Amino acid sequence: MAESIGQRVTRLREAKKFSITQLAKLGQFSRQTQEQNEKDLRLPSVKILNAWSRVLKVSTDYILHGDAAHSVAPAAHSVAPAAHSVAPAAHSVDAIASLRGLAASMCEDASKQEWIALIELWATGFEARNRRSK
């Protein structure tokens, strides 16, 4: 059986000899959030994935997939903040539809289910933020 994201993060955290509280403080999120992520009760946000990558010194790809080929320093995957800027609201519906279409086309590959769930989580949060800003 494949290792889950929570199991992988727990293993990495323990290898670095961090407690749950220490990793949460270093990542600047709550202990409860860390516990829920390690128990696979919630999907990690992009912010949390980036914090884990930085603190645990592994790539976000490694956290999500566990492949040794993805186990590189986080700097190799760093992206300027501008690359993450969100399209104007007029384009948001198209962007969400595109992401959901991409996720649906990836469904045949079970190893990509975590990415699909993460895209869906992002799209749902994005929709909620757009509704509040109108």
Image (cartoon, grey):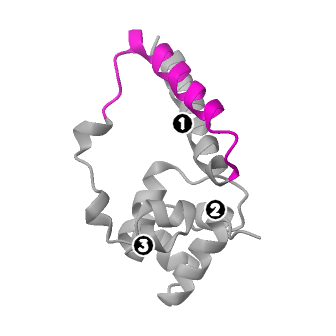
The residue where tag 3 is placed is 71
Residue 98 versus residue 14: which sits nearer the camera?
Answer: 98
Q: Position of residue 42 (x, y in %)?
A: 68, 53
The residue where tag 1 is placed is 122
Residue, x 55% and y 60% (percent of image)? 64
Q: Position of residue 131 (x, y in %)?
A: 54, 16
Image: 82 above or below 87: below
Q: Is residue 28 left or right of residue 10?
A: left
Q: Amino acid at mark 3?
A: Ser
Image: 106 above or below 43: above
Q: Nearer the viewer, mark 2 or mark 3?
A: 3
Image: 62 above or below 10: above
Disc 1 from disc 3: Cα separation: 24 Å
Q: Which residue ends up furthest to the right in the rendered image?
A: 1
Using the image, tell me which numbered label, if any, was put on residue 11.
none
At label 2, counting other C-alpha atoms closer than 10 Å, the crowd grade (few under 14, some 14-19, many 20 or more) is many
Disc 2 from disc 3: Cα separation: 20 Å
At label 3, counting other C-alpha atoms closer than 10 Å, the crowd grade (few under 14, some 14-19, many 20 or more) is some
Q: Position of residue 29 (x, y in %)?
A: 49, 61
Q: Secondary structure at mark 2?
A: helix
Q: Secondary structure at mark 3?
A: loop
Residue 28 visible within the image? no
The residue where tag 2 is placed is 37
Tell me which numbered mark, 2 or 3, is placed earlier along the sequence. Answer: 2
Tell me which numbered mark, 1 or 3, is placed earlier along the sequence. Answer: 3
Residue 68 shown in magenta: no
* Span highlighted in magenta in the image: 85-110
Residue, x 32% and y 71% (percent of image)? 73
Residue 109 shown in magenta: yes
